[in-house]
Image: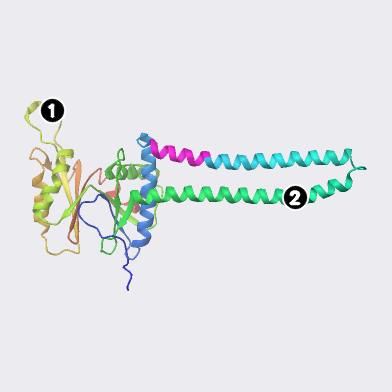
Amino acid sequence: KPVKKGGYPLRPGVEGFFITCEGGRERQASNEAIDVIESFYEELVEASDSDPKLEAERKTLNKVTKFQYSSDDDDSDGDCEIGSDEQSKKKSNLQVQGAEVKNGDDIERPAKKQCVVSEYKSVDEKIDAELAELGDKSKRRFTKLDSGCNGVIFIRMSKKEGDPEPKDIVQHMFTSLASTRKHVSRFLLRVLPIEVTCYTSEEEIKRAMKPLIDKYFPPVVGEEAAEQKAPCKFAVLYDARANTGIERTKIIDAVAKSVPGVHKVDLANPDLHIVVQIVKTVCLIGVVERYKELGKYNIRQLTSP
């Protein structure tokens, strides 16, 4: 029976990260993407203190590790003291009990060696078990889905209560990279946050856009409301892969017309970009800020000298 390659397929109803990479490097890029996203996720959580459970797990791991090593140190110190006492006894009773002390040394050495070996084995097992447990939790939070396209990967995020949004993680990532210019990946190119996914039809896209419209483009009514919530300028960032049955202009118009009329299209200097990526029969939608300023969300472009 043939074994299916790749992971679960990309489908509507998920959120996460749309990522481009070098063709033929999808597997390596997927593993690297999970590591990179996880590291920036942890930075963001630590900075905002929004996930005390994760911090408690980290403290517990450090505490256990420190305790075990400190116990080993204490045990070794105790062994040294016992050895010193035995040496002093040897000196005081050298003429009377020399043979008995020698036999005692022969008995204690195997016991000491056996005790040390069993203790180190126990420590290694505990550390390996805890690291494996933390690794499993990381994989559950971020998992790869098979896009079915060359040079494209998708990392799904399974959010829990209090977790930051994919947009917040990507925004933090590129803001940090813009200031440090640090190389964090070998295979990743563009990383875009995806908040909703649906099938590639105009009606489905309009329906999927509703929560994003309420979140980023609220309708402004009246002059007083307009002063409180200034209308924003936006542009649609569209691309399609492995799908020739849809028209570019129809999808862009469907997205743009979903935004209330008070918010205007501005291709030159938009405040927000609406990301629309078509991958086969799935449409991925998200919203990003400072798109051009942050190197078009391309890691290699942003960190290159």
Residue 161 inside the magenta-drawn segment: no
Contact (Cβ within 8 Å) of mark 2 with mark 1: no
Can you tell which quarter of the image residue 280 is in?
bottom left
Magenta stretch holds residue 55? yes
Q: How crowded is mark 2: few (under 14 residues within 10 Å), some or many (20 or more)?
A: few
**In the picture, which quadrant includes the N terminus?**
bottom left
Does the rendering let one see residue 170?
yes
- Residue 109, disc: 2
Q: Name the residue under label 1.
A: 227
Quarter holding residue 259: top left
| Front residue of this view, candidates 231 and 109 | 109
Classify residue 159 as left or right of residue 235.
right
Q: What residue type is labelled 2?
A: Arg
Give the residue displayed 74% in from the left and 41% down from the top.
80
Which residues make up the magenta segment?
Answer: 52-63
Task: Report helix, strand or loop for mark 2.
Answer: helix
Residue 202 locus on image (x, y percent)? 9, 54
